[in-house]
Image (tube, grey):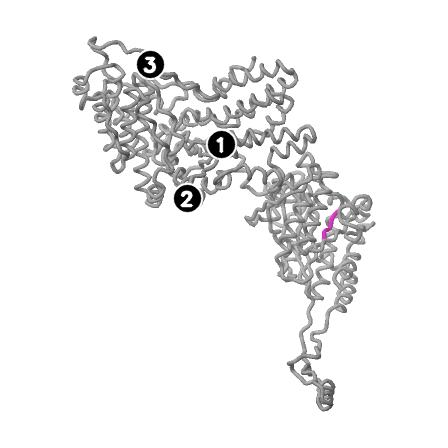
């Protein structure tokens, strides 16, 4: 309870109360479970949008009632599922996961997190229609193209709306069962992002005549607008009826393609209208205005007062449909329309409605006060809907029931705007004043962008970091004898970073095998390609000087393997020359009454080796270890061996590639390209080999899968993948990529390579290799070199044996 004030400020009163209730209810069952929920749930709720907070709380309540011991598991996994499933699917899914909990907690958690192929297949079976998750990225890019801001498309718990910052859409659409369902998604995106694009939140009440209330902390201008009327619920409904019309007209005018989709889809992207018989008079009037706004038939109602009020209020529709109409025009349309409908609440007669025809509201934007001839308004007898946990608990007037939230079409729900975004909105308006003072014609949209640049949200910052390059390169000692005039950098003490690779802009997702659940985790690892930059040729020159005699012997040995340029093929039905022996034999057979063969020709055919080999080099930090008295490091010996083998392969004419790998964590696997298969062994390639250096960790499975994918598309008859490693796969960027998990994943990746027609082979310098390599690579799939310095001598011999 010490943190209750902070929870209310961060999550809102509804979510904070629901959280407290869940903790107390759980404590009545198990104090330890309650402590776990109390500690972990606030962070989970803070990371969710308002509607999803209520969904999570309701789900956890159900779990507490049925299987309380599974609460920590569901609390860890459910937040990620909210964006992929509706409430019914979510309940069924969690029930399946909990059923696995007793047998295998690890498998249950992977199932609930959708981390295995099996769980994804079952999740797909639960879905109906087009899933938002499948098109979310496309729609996000589409929304950003419309409004020019870093808006995100998020799941909206079955509804389509915007909070004024992001767009929320239903988790799935299953209306037509074909490509038109995607068209609905596209229309809903354009329609709701239209509120951002055409400035619904750009309202400035200083430009709208009226004595408006003093702004409250964190209050948006549209919220302040409706608070200036006697019945804020009625004002809010009328404002958004008019604003919906304005924004849709602007969208149709700006995007004719979207307009055609809207017309072609008819009412498939809109909600059904409520029955008038179930509404009170003022509610009926608002509904009639809404139907007129949508271009629907407006039915006749028996109450003349309602007809008159709706007719008066509808006059504002023409103003907001005008070209270039702004949100200020919507506010003025609200001022003109409000008194007629408000009069229905105050029980006046038709004469009063006549007098309101053409009048503007009072100076404060409110309807005229009663003059004493009217009865005091009776309290309404309709019950307001209870807000979901996390929703703003706004005060609603008792004498008017707000319109039901429209689950489709377009809607602005400012109550769902997160506190951080409200603060940014306030900062943007303050910044706008300063910008206008300095620059003159600055806009609120520009001020928002600048405010967000100065204070990015966690999600935006994570996306920003993902777009940056990986580790910039190896540590190199500062020069002792600079060849150029000394600079500030030359006087730096210790190591500096040298960027030795450039990102190619290509990223790939690969699965990973989890032996503990017996299944792949699809799309689990993100791999980024880098191209090694050329550098100095000093390393290759030193190798040539030190191993010159060995290079010569190896080249001569490999040249002996080169096939003859051509060979004569005999026994052909057509060819370059007649094979005299076969021709005589065929003639004799025909003279003897037989049928002589017509295969009496020969032809010379070019004979070629058809081999593609890729050397995959472990560049983890452990390859920085010194291995001999000459202070050579493992990575340097690996590079020496690569220079020798490339010289030898160049002599024999085989095609080879040199790739390295390292990284840190499953989202930052780096794949370094020093030489491509069809790239000649030039001085530039030699320089790239010299630039290879130790990096961080080695996640072998992902690197093997990417190398396999590259080799599998090559037309060569023999495809060989040679892995140069100094030991076990290990990635300290994850809490479990080590020992059995890492070795089993590597084994699975190698099995996948064999299935793809790629022959893998491991060369390791780890003396303890035989203890685990047999399980990973098979009995003939690896060799251990007991002395690292012998690698340059041994590698050509191994290659000859594998490719002869």
Q: In the shown orientation, is residue 579 left or right of residue 364?
A: right
Q: Residue at x 65, y 16 (%)?
A: 30
Nearer the observer, 128 or 221: 128
Q: Is residue 476 magenta?
A: no
Q: Between disc 1 and disc 3, whose residue precedes?
A: 3
Q: Nearer the viewer, mark 1 or mark 3?
A: 3
**Measured from the top left, where is residue 769 in percent x and y?**
80, 46
The mark nearer the N terminus, 3 or 2, is 2
Q: Is residue 157 left or right of residue 119?
A: left
Q: Position of residue 725 (x, y in %)?
A: 74, 48
Q: Quadrant of residue 475?
A: top right
Mark 1–mark 3 Cα distance, whole angstroms, equals: 45 Å
Q: Label 2 neighbourhood size at 10 Å, few (<14), some (14-19), many (20+)? A: some
Of pointers 2 and 1, the one earlier in the residue sequence: 2
Tag on residue 456?
A: 1
Which residue is tagged 2?
Answer: 180
Q: Residues within 10 Å of mark 3 (few under 14, many from 20)?
A: some
Q: Secondary structure at mark 2?
A: helix
Magenta segment:
722-726
């Amino acid at each position: 309870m010490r943190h209750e004030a902070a929870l209310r400020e961060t999550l809102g009163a509804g979510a904070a109360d629901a959280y407290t209730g869940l903790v107390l209810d759980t404590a009545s069952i198990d104090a330890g479970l309650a402590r776990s929920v109390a500690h972990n749930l606030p962070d989970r709720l803070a990371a969710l949008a308002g509607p999803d907070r209520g969904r999570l709380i309701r789900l956890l309540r159900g779990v507490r009632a049925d299987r309380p011991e599974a609460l920590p598991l569901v609390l860890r996994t459910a937040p990620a599922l909210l964006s992929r499933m509706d409430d019914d699917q979510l309940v069924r899914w969690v029930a399946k996961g909990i059923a696995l909990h007793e047998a295998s907690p690890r498998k249950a958690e992977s199932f609930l997190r959708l981390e295995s192929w099996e769980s994804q297949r079952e999740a797909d079976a639960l879905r109906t229609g087009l899933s938002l998750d499948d098109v979310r990225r496309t729609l996000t890019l589409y929304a950003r193209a419309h409004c020019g801001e870093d808006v995100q498309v998020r799941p909206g718990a079955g509804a389509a709306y915007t909070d004024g910052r992001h767009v929320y859409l239903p988790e799935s659409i299953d209306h037509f069962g074909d490509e038109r369902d995607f068209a609905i998604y596209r229309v809903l995106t354009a329609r709701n992002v239209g509120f951002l694009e055409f400035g619904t939140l750009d309202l400035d009440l200083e430009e709208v005549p009226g004595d408006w209330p003093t702004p409250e902390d964190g209050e948006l201008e549209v919220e302040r607008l409706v608070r200036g009327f006697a019945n804020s619920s009625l004002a809010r409904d009328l404002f958004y009826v008019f604003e919906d019309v304005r924004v849709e007209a602007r969208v149709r005018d700006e995007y004719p393609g979207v307009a055609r989709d809207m017309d072609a889809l008819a009412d498939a992207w809109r909600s059904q209208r409520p029955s008038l018989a179930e509404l009170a008079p003022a509610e009926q009037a608002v509904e009639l205005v809404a139907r007129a706004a949508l271009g629907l038939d407006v039915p006749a109602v028996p109450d003349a007062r309602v007809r008159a009020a709706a007719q008066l209020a509808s006059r504002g529709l023409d103003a907001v449909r005008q070209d270039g109409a702004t949100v200020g025009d919507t506010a003025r349309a609200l001022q003109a329309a409000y008194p007629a409908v408000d009069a229905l609440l105050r029980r006046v007669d038709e004469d009063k409605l006549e007098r309101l025809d053409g009048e503007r509201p009072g100076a404060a934007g409110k309807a005229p006060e009663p003059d004493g001839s009217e009865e005091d308004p009776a309290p309404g007898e309709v019950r307001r809907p209870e807000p979901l946990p996390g929703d703003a608990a706004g005060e609603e007037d008792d004498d008017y029931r707000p319109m039901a939230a429209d689950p489709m079409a377009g809607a602005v729900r400012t109550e769902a705007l997160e506190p951080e975004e409200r603060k940014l909105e306030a900062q943007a308006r303050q910044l706008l004043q300063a910008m206008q003072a300095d620059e003159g014609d600055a806009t609120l949209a520009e001020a928002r962008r600048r405010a967000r640049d100065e204070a990015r949200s966690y999600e935006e910052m994570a996306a920003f970091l993902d777009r940056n390059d990986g580790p910039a390169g190896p540590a190199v000692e500062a020069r002792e004898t600079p060849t150029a005039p000394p600079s500030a950098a030359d006087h730096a003490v210790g190591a500096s970073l040298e960027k030795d690779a450039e990102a190619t802009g290509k990223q790939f997702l690969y699965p990973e095998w989890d032996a503990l659940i017996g299944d792949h985790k699809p799309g689990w690892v993100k791999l980024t390609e880098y191209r090694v930059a050329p550098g100095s040729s000093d390393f290759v020159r030193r190798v040539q000087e030190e191993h010159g005699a060995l290079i010569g012997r190896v080249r001569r040995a490999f040249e002996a393997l080169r096939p003859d340029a051509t060979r004569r093929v005999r026994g052909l039905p057509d060819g370059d020359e007649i094979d005299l022996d076969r021709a005589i034999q065929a003639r004799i057979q025909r003279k003897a009454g037989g049928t002589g063969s017509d295969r009496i020709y020969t032809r010379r055919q070019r004979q070629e080796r058809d081999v593609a080999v890729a050397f995959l080099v472990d560049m983890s930090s452990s390859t920085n270890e010194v291995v001999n008295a000459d202070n050579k490091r493992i990575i340097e010996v690996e590079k020496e061996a690569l220079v020798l083998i490339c010289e030898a392969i160049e002599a024999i004419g085989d095609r080879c590639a040199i790739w390295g790998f390292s990284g840190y964590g499953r989202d930052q696997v780096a794949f370094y390209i020093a030489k491509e298969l069809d790239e000649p062994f030039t001085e530039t390639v030699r320089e790239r080999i010299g630039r290879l250096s130790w990096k961080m960790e080695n996640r072998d499975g992902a690197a093997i899968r990417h190398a396999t994918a590259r080799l599998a598309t090559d037309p060569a008859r023999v495809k060989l993948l040679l892995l140069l490693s100094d030991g076990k796969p290990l990635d300290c960027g994850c809490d479990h990529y080590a020992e059995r998990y890492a070795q089993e994943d590597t084994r699975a990746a190698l099995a996948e390579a064999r299935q793809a027609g790629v022959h893998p082979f491991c060369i390791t310098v780890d003396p303890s290799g035989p203890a685990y390599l047999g399980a990973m690579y098979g009995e003939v799939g690896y060799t251990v070199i007991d002395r690292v310095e012998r690698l340059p001598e041994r590698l050509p011999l191994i290659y000859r044996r594998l490719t002869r």
